[in-house]
Amino acid sequence: MIDPRILREDPDAVRASLRKRGEDPSVVDRLIELDQRRRSAIARADALRAEQKSLGKQIGKASADERESLLAHAKELAAEVKAAEAEQSEASEEFSALHAVIPNLVHPEAPSGGEQDYVVLKHVGQPREFDFTPRDHLELGELLGAIDTERGAKTSGARFYFLTGVGAQLQLGLLNMAIAQAVETGFTPMITPVLVRPEIMQGTGFLGAHSSEVYRLEADDLYLVGTSEVSLAGYHADEILDLSGGPLRYAGWSSCFRREAGSYGKDTRGIIRVHQFDKVEMFSYCRPEEAEAEHERLLQWEEQMLAKIEVPYRVIDTAGGDLGASAARKYDCEAWIPTQGTYRELTSTSNCTTYQARRLSVRYRDENGKPQIAATLNGTLATTRWLVAILENHQQADGSVRVPKALQPFVGKEVLKPV
């Protein structure tokens, strides 16, 4: 959640951020009103409790004649204290509930607008010119014995699939290459839980506007994660970290689950938009003043991975209206998909500033030893969707697919051949 001090000291910044996201800024006025009411109720309750304490001392010293009237006053005062505490509790609950749904402040340099209002920061590589009609990733996957969506649907329903044979090898090789790079660059590898408690899912900001995309196990009151970011954010909940040596960095490998609510009819062919996939996710805890530089580093590491799979891509600065609630700024790397004639997202990296850590009470000690809220960031190193870009960009006329050189040691093959 956003820092309440910003709400009090610079409410216009919060209004501007909401406008950038395309949301109603009038909620800020309601929040300020609730905050004032809450703080006033706290002050009144504190004053009454102090008076109550003082009266208690008077009663202990009072004569028999005075005691009766003092006890009557104490009874009235107790009722006032109870009413003030009820007012404090009610105002605090209303403020907290509304405060929790306010999204993070959008970075001033992030573009305004919606999904189509991104800014392209750069292009890397040129789309390949084919001297044959390229096949899409599903046709290639079926030729190679790598992807089986029919049996996936038979077993689990629409948007499920099996990765078989070289398809499984390709994904495992890709994710292992991602872990190897993460370890080389100082990340601690983690295999994370895929089920988390409600307070962890809520704390990361995934139970707001997009809660319909999250799978919930009602009988157990647990949620399936859509990214290991959630588990990694919860890893240090309610802790004070030692960040004196720089950011703490983790690389989480997990299966991810998304309901894809509202996306019916979109990308139904193949494995671009599915309910389950695997991913390696970078996650950093750092001091707030280090967050922007860390964000740029995460982007560089994503681009290193993209270079290893040898596909053309572009980097975009995502517009405010297309940011998740927890992100202040997000860069996407989108790979060229030949059969679609467009770029599609393969990675994203988000700077969540102190938004998640404040909700999850993740802190560090400053140079004076005082606890402060940490910043969190995340970025994708590889996912199942990368197979789409690899298969389509490296296909050959006979239906075989060349394995990118950097990936070959992890897959154990130079070429994937039709079966």
Image (tube, rainbow, N blue to C red):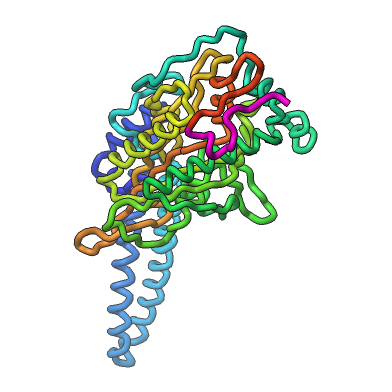
Give the percent coordinates (x, y) of residue 135: 64, 15
For this view, does 86 lie left or right of residue 363?
right
Residue at 63% of width from left, 18% of height from top?
Answer: 136
Quadrant of residue 393 in the image? top right
Question: Residue 417: within the magenta?
Answer: yes
Compare residues 353 and 176 and report the one nearer the observer: 176
Give the percent coordinates (x, y) of residue 351: 36, 39
Compare residues 29 and 399 and report the one nearer the observer: 399
Compare residues 222 and 57 and report the one nearer the observer: 222
**Is residue 313 shown above or below 133?**
below
Total tally of numbered discs in the picture: 0
- Residue 34 shows in this picture: no
**Is residue 100 shown above or below 21?**
below
Residues shaded magenta: 406-419
For this view, does 183 lie left or right of residue 105?
right
Residue at 43% of width from left, 15% of height from top?
Answer: 126
Residue at 37% of width from left, 85% of height from top?
Answer: 68
**Is residue 307 shown above or below 375?**
above
* Residue at the left extreme, as displayed: 368
Compare residues 38 and 323 and report the one nearer the observer: 323
Residue at 49% of width from left, 19% of height from top?
Answer: 336
Question: Residue 244: within the magenta?
Answer: no
* Residue at the bottom extreme, as displayed: 64
Give the percent coordinates (x, y) of residue 359: 42, 52
